[in-house]
Every structure is written in C-alpha cells, then in structure tokens.
Amino acid sequence: MADIYHHARHFINLVYAEDEDKQIASAIAEINALKVDVAYPFLLGLYNDYSTGQLGREDFLAILRLVESYVFRRSICGIPTNSLNKTFAQFMRGVDRNHYRESVEAVFLGMESYRRFPRDTEFMTAFVMNDIYNLRVRNYLLRKLENSGHSKEPVVVESYTIEHVLPQNKSLNAAWQAELGPAWQQVQSTYLHTIGNLTLTGYNPELSDRSFGEKRTMDGGFDKSPLYLNASIAHQEHWGPEQITNRAQLLAERAVAIWASPTLSAEAVARRSHVGETEDTRSYPLPETNYGAYLQGDILALFEQLRKRILNLDASVREETKRYYIAYKTVTNFVDIEPQRQRLRLTLNMRFDEIVDPLNVCRDITNVGRWGNGDVETTIASAADLDNVMFLIEQAFEKQREDAA
C-alpha cells in the first residue's frame, strides 16, 4: 500500500502538473498539452528515480523537455503515433541509471524508422512546408513560438485568433490577385495554411480580406502589434511566396531551438550503443564469424542476391553481422540467415502455425535449438528459389510491422 501511495502521488503530479517545483510542473504541463498519455509509464519511472535521488533535477527537466520535443517533432513530420505506447513502455530497458541523461539521449538517437526522433533537417523541412493550420496542436505551437524567451510575461494565446496573412477566401480581391500575380490561385493553395502565412491577432474581423498594405498599417495592423510573431511581417512591403518562405524559415530556426534534439556526440552514442551487449547482440567482422569461410563462390553469389532483396523491402530494414548468423531487422529480427557450405539456412521470426507455406518447404523448429530467432526454418540453395523464399520472408517482415503497430 505504501508503494501504491508513493507512485499514485507521482501519477497525480503528472496528470495535474502539480509538482512543487514550478519548472518541473511547467515541463509536465507542456507534455500534457500534447495529449500523450502513453508516455506515462516512462514518465512514472523517471519521477520515481527523481524522487529517490537517482536522477538529478536538471537532468529530469532536460529529459522531460526531450519527451516533449520527441512527440512534437513526430507530429510535425507526420509520423504515426500508434507505436508510441510500446516505445515508451519499453524505454526504461535502455536506460543506464549510472549515466542517466546520456543513456536516455542515446536511446532517443538510436531509434529508427517509425520510432525515430526526427533530426533537425527533417523537422525544419516539414515545419516550413506542411499544413500547420489544421494541425491538432496548432495553438500549442503558436504559443510556444510566441512566448519562447520571455516566459515571465507570456502572451495568452487564447486571447487571440489565428490570422492568415494571405486570406483564405478562394475569391481573392483584385488587390491580392495583383499582389500574388497570375498564378495567385496556385500560390494560395500552396502557402495558405503553412506556418509562414499564419500569425496571431486580436483584430481578425477588422483585418479580414484587406490588402496586405492595409493589414500592415491600419489600426491593429501588423506594424503596430506587440507580438513577436508579427515582427517579421511588419517591415515587409509585399506578401508572396518569397516573404512567406523566408518567414517560415525564420520560425523553423526558432522551432529547432525550442523543440531541441538530443545533444549527445556521435562518439557518445557509439559508446552507449555497446552498453548491455551480450555475445548474441554484438556485431562481428566477417572473419570472426562462425560462417565466414562459407561465403564464397556460388553461396556468396546467392547470399548477395537474397541480401539485396531483403534490404529493398523497406528503408527501415538494417543488417547486423552476428557471430553465428546475419540478422535483418526493423524493430527486432524478422529473418536470420546462417550461411552453410552448400545452402543458406533461414530462421523466420514468427510462429509456425502463422506461416503460409504452399510449397511446404518450412520446418517447425519451436523446440529445436537454433542460433536464429523464431519458430520457422527454411533453406535455399539456388537462385531459382528466391521468389518463394522472399514470399516467406515478407510474411515475417509484415508480421513484425503489425506487432509493432
């Protein structure tokens, strides 16, 4: 009961952002604004370690902000959220409490494919070009952009409305058509809802569909606004693709600083990647493997053909050279290849009763010792069998993607 009470207090602090430390409470509130309850299993572990002194205050704050950045960047980049529950539920497995913050950053940077932490280039590209107006977290986004750097005097975004500098009206007036040129419809379609064309105002009805010059200089216009978001609009003489893109780039650079990525060096990531490795999880150079001598002649040629087709399944597929087999994985292994003298032996990571095997070339190895992962075994000795083997491998690949989702 004492344990339940202890963790329940942490849960309440997370749900209501009630920590006595105002900065921690604020960091939690920002995560809650993104409505990412699936992060709670990981956050509860962090909170417990913070409360017991295993995790320092500054590192706790830094990790909370990384969680916020991770979720927000993925949202901007359009990465599906259906894997986040498993990602956060399993996150603590990769954390080394003796090097807490470093190991958390290494886990973030080590995730790939649909679990990745979007890097600055990917994030900035999506931030500039994507539809921000119809994003669920648009108010949160604009609030953070506006208030970054002056948290003691925050702007209450809810007191303002979102303004399209280039209006939404599909029948733009003559002044706007002249401003944008003959291709005004294409310009409007391309840039209307992007961040470069969005701002905040208290004078939305007054601004309406007025020309840019009027919007800029009228009472309540952009050049009289105290808001940061309007400063980069106020000094413009015209408003079109160039101005919208330039402003978007400026805001993207601000966004990269607000929603920062981990700062761990490549050397530190490499160092952390070996923590907890066992004989089975390490990668080996080919001469140190148990099968290197077999990868020559016809078997090598066959392996290279099969290898190419497996790697072409998806950009997320990666290859790891183990001591006893070669692994192909996304989240984890979906097929392992053990080169032998006259054939390649494959282990597929799925249950035997799940495999569709019309040629009856698979073997149930559920209770048989093998170096690979899974309950299905098959072999290939000729390029003529590549299509059928790939049919089986694709089943294992798709099965893993379904389980990860």
Image (tube, helix red, strand yellow):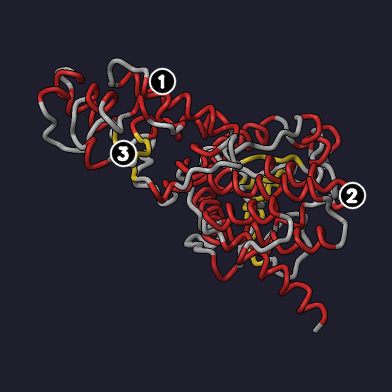
Q: Is residue 348 visible?
A: no
| On screen, residue 139 above or below 246 | below
Q: In which quarter of the image is the N terminus?
A: bottom right
Residue linked to disc 2: 98
Disc 1 marks a residue whose amino acid type is: Asn
Residue 59 location, x and y as percent? 78, 46
Q: How crowded is mark 1: few (under 14 residues within 10 Å), some or many (20 or more)?
A: some
**Mark toward the viewer: 2 or 1:** 1
Residue linked to disc 1: 246
User: What secondary structure is marked by label 3?
Assistant: strand
Instruction: First in sequence, mark 3 or 2: give its number.
Output: 2
| On screen, residue 91 above or below 134 | below
Disc 3 marks a residue whose amino acid type is: Glu
387 lies left or right of 277: left
Disc 2 marks a residue whose amino acid type is: Asn
Q: Which residue is farthest front?
A: 219
Q: Which residue is drawn at 76% across and 66% down?
A: 368
Q: Mark 2 to mark 1: distance in Å?
A: 45 Å
User: What secondary structure is marked by label 1?
Assistant: helix
